[in-house]
Image (spheres, rainbow, N blue to C red):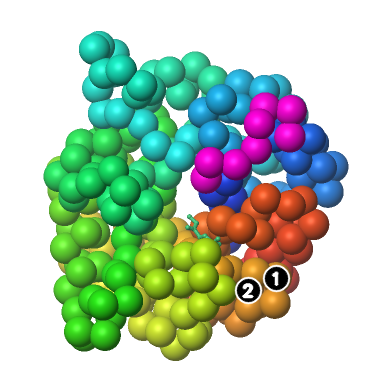
Amino acid sequence: MHPRKKLIAGNWKMNKTNGDAVALVKDIVTEAGKVTEVEIVIAPPFTALESAAKALEGSNVKLAAQNMHHEASGAFTGEVSAPMLRALFATHVILGHSERRTYFQESDAFINQKVLAALKNQLKPILCVGETLAEREAGSTLKVVQTQLEAGLEGVSKEQAPSVVVAYEPVWAIGTGKVATTDQAQEVHAFIRGLLVKLFGEAIAQKVRILYGGSMKPANAPELLAQKDIDGGLIGGASLEARSFVELIKAAEAAK
Ligand code: 13P
């Protein structure tokens, strides 16, 4: 048995208008809202957070944002802050997703500021790390992951660390249908666990969930979720439809 509760998180990215989002949340709640053996998190776009929060009220489904700014308020046009997300009952926030690193030039230092701000505001950061195809082919996967993880978690205390969720998302596997093999994924997950041991000690490192992300689907999830250090999934495409997302939750239930 795994020492950590599995976590299935849906990253909806820039998909679903408000009405479509509510319909999807309702379907997920109907099918999986009473599940207790797996932690379920959904991350709709900002525009649907408030209505998603209402639609999941009373269920076990939790709410995440896909990004935030590290300042609490101020002249940052277009941004939203941790207190704003908390006011909408978000419990988690995805930070450092590769799409933000690539398309919006987010640096490790910038992401680190967000991680610290999230924790300060009782939001659980889902910190994404992962290598590009070129980096994997150059043999620098572990080095890249180490740099992103250590820089992203700089200044996080031992008390705060169990609230952190790490997501390993190989960039070449995101939205491509190319899933990492279980061996490739487990190797990096075990490496991340080892880094967490160095940063926070064995007992705390054993509490931190490390999710896999990148073309995770009902067909490949059981094998991935059976790995010792894979504690769940950060799901893109397969989280946009209730049926596949619920199947992934069921796969995590079966793997616990
Ligand atoms: P896909 O599941 O669509 O590959 O996306 C993964 C992802 O980026 C989740 O954050």
Residue 182 sits above or below residue 67 on the image: below
Q: Is residue 169 left or right of residue 227?
A: left
Q: Nearer the viewer, residue 174 or 209?
A: 174
Mark 1 residue crowding within 10 angstroms, few (<14) / some (14–19) / many (20+): some
- x, y (%) of residue 148? 22, 59
Q: Which residue is mark 2?
A: 221
Instruction: Tell me how far mark 2 sits from mark 1, CA to CA.
Output: 5 Å
Which residue position holds label 1?
218
Residue 18 falls in image quadrant: top right
Q: Nearer the viewer, residue 196 or 21?
A: 21
At x 30%, y 28%, the residue is 69
Residue 133 sits above or below residue 8 on the image: below
Residue type (three-letter) at the residue carrying disc 1: Pro
Q: Give the position of the N terminus as an image quadrant.
A: bottom right
Q: Residue at x 36, y 21 (%)?
A: 78
Q: Residue 254: x, y in percent?
A: 72, 71
Secondary element at image label 1: loop
Instruction: Please state the total of marks drawn on the protein image.
Output: 2
* Image position of 23 with respect to 216: above or below: above
Q: Position of residue 68 (x, y in %)?
A: 36, 31
Residue 48 position by quadrant: top right
Identified at 18% across, 47% down, the residue is 107
Name the residue furthest top.
74
Whether residue 151 sits left or right of residue 234 in the image: it is left
